[in-house]
Image: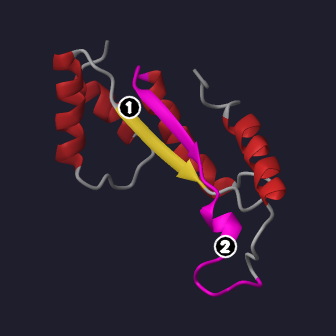
Amino acid sequence: MKSAEEQFEYIKKGCVEIIQEGELKAKLKRSLEEKKALKVKLGFDPTAPDIHLGHTVVIRKMKHFQDLGHDVIFLIGDFTGLIGDPSGRSATRPPMTREQIKQNAETYKSQIFKILDPE
């Protein structure tokens, strides 16, 4: 198992800045001391049929945590899809049907689990 500092350096790879670096380092250290994996969560709203380039940045970072033995929890929400764009730009992101959301969510899962281990 890598030390907390080695884990931090691996996670930091490709990042310009990590907000609250000290807090992340402390959590990594505590994780090792307690022999308990961190739980790292990420959520998307399936408002489009496919994940996009912006999603891949954080998915890759989640993979780094997973590679280090931490638990990654991937959530798919439906609120934004059901109500449309809450900023009022409804032409950009109109409300979707539950069936559309379900189809998009399935596509997200199949794409994301090519990178992340679903277990």
Q: Position of residue 51 (x, y in %)?
A: 71, 51
Q: Amino acid at mark 2?
A: Ile
**Which corner quadrant of the image does residue 29 belong to?**
top left
SS of the residue under disc 2: helix
**Which corner quadrant of the image does residue 118 belong to?**
top right
Asked whether, in this view, residue 91 is left or right of residue 58, the answer is: right
Q: Are marks 1 and 2 in contact (CB under 8 Å)?
A: no
Q: Position of residue 73 (x, y in %)?
A: 49, 35
Pointer 1 or 2: first along the chain:
1
Pick whichever, 7 or 62, lies toward us: 62
Most extreme residue toward the bottom is: 88
Segment tinted magenta in the rendering: 68-91
Q: Which residue lies under the disc numbered 2?
A: 83
Q: Is residue 115 magenta?
A: no
Residue at image coords 17%, 27%: 30
Q: Is residue 69 above or below residue 8?
A: above
Q: Which residue lies under the disc numbered 1?
A: 10
Q: Amino acid at mark 1?
A: Tyr
Q: Is residue 76 above or below residue 33?
A: below
